[in-house]
Amino acid sequence: MELFVAKDSIVRKIWGKGDTVLFVFAGASAEFALNKAVDWLYFTGKLPADPLGRLFSTVMYARGIVFSEKEMALKTIDKINSIHGAVEKGRGQRIPDWAYRDVLFMLIHYSMAAYELLERKMTEAEKEDLYDVFYRMGLRMNIPGLPESFSEWKVAHVYHLENDMEKSAFTIDLYKQYRKHLGAFRFWLLWESQKLVVPKKVRELMGMSRFSFVTPILFFYKISRVLRLDNFLKSLVMPKKYREDIKGLDVNE
């Protein structure tokens, strides 16, 4: 049985822990809102109607690919292409190539940022491993112009942050939807969590301070993992309808 991601890959460790995936989700929700191509996510009306569900499904697609056999992973990627193709046909336009790259770059960055926040610093070899997995995803999606190595990606990522993001009316509306669907407390928790993983450019555009109230909370959360109380705490982060999904995020290999 050939796997898309090797058993000993750091990527399986990153995406096999629910708390890490939730921090990927938190960071991604900020960058989705700022991306200049966010109007594509508004085209079908599904994003503003259910922003948490749409973003969570994107993260879960990526997670599903990581833990699939190679053949199934490729079929999942092809399904994603098919969905995008249908949206493009409906609008009569093509989604810009740079927008596809941006989403891929986003998943790479937040995979690293979340893991290093909750676990430890990654080695250069692990970062290359991480990049290789998402690079292969991007190739299957026929995304052009992908950097061929992690070192090249770092340069391209900086360019993306400087050129492909802006705070727009879509950004403001999407954050209003986050607050509406999460409630005041969970929205505050999302905002404070985003500060810990988003790049400097995102903090600047969103007017975020460097200090996060989640920082001291993380110390106690890490203790809760040892005491096996973390599932209870994770259930507080997302609305009730996502709690069963969150429980299933932890993979024991």
Image (cartoon, rainbow, N blue to C red):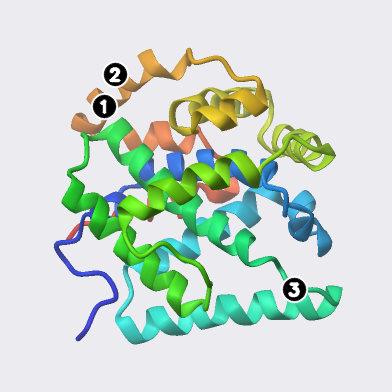
- The answer for how far apart the CA atoms under marks 1 and 2 are is 5 Å
- Dots 1 and 2: beta carbons under 8 Å? yes
Image position, residue 212 (x, y; %): 48, 16
Q: Residues within 10 Å of mark 1 (few under 14, many from 20)?
A: some
Q: Residue at x 31, y 60 (%)?
A: 149
Q: Residue at x 75, y 38 (%)?
A: 171
Three-letter amino acid code at the position of disc 3 = Arg
Q: In the rendered structure, find residue 208 and report the number of the disc placed on it.
A: none
Q: Does residue 87 lie above or below 179 as drawn?
A: below
Q: Is residue 188 left or right of residue 211?
A: right
Residue carrying label 2: 219
Residue carrying label 1: 222
Residue carrying label 3: 94
- In the rendered image, is residue 180 in sight? yes
Three-letter amino acid code at the position of disc 2 = Phe
Image position, residue 47 (x, y; %): 74, 54
Q: Is residue 246 left or right of residue 50?
A: left
Q: Does residue 7 lie above or below 142 as drawn?
A: above
Q: What is the secondary structure assignment of the residue under circle 1? A: helix
Labels 1, 3: front one:
3
Q: Quadrant of residue 162?
A: top right
> What quarter of the picture does the C terminus occupy?
bottom left
Q: Quadrant of residue 219?
A: top left
Three-letter amino acid code at the position of disc 1 = Lys
- The answer for how far apart the CA atoms under marks 1 and 3 are is 44 Å
Image position, residue 194 (x, y; %): 52, 30
Image position, residue 115 (x, y; %): 30, 40
Q: What is the secondary structure assignment of the residue under circle 3? A: loop
- Dots 2 and 3: beta carbons under 8 Å? no
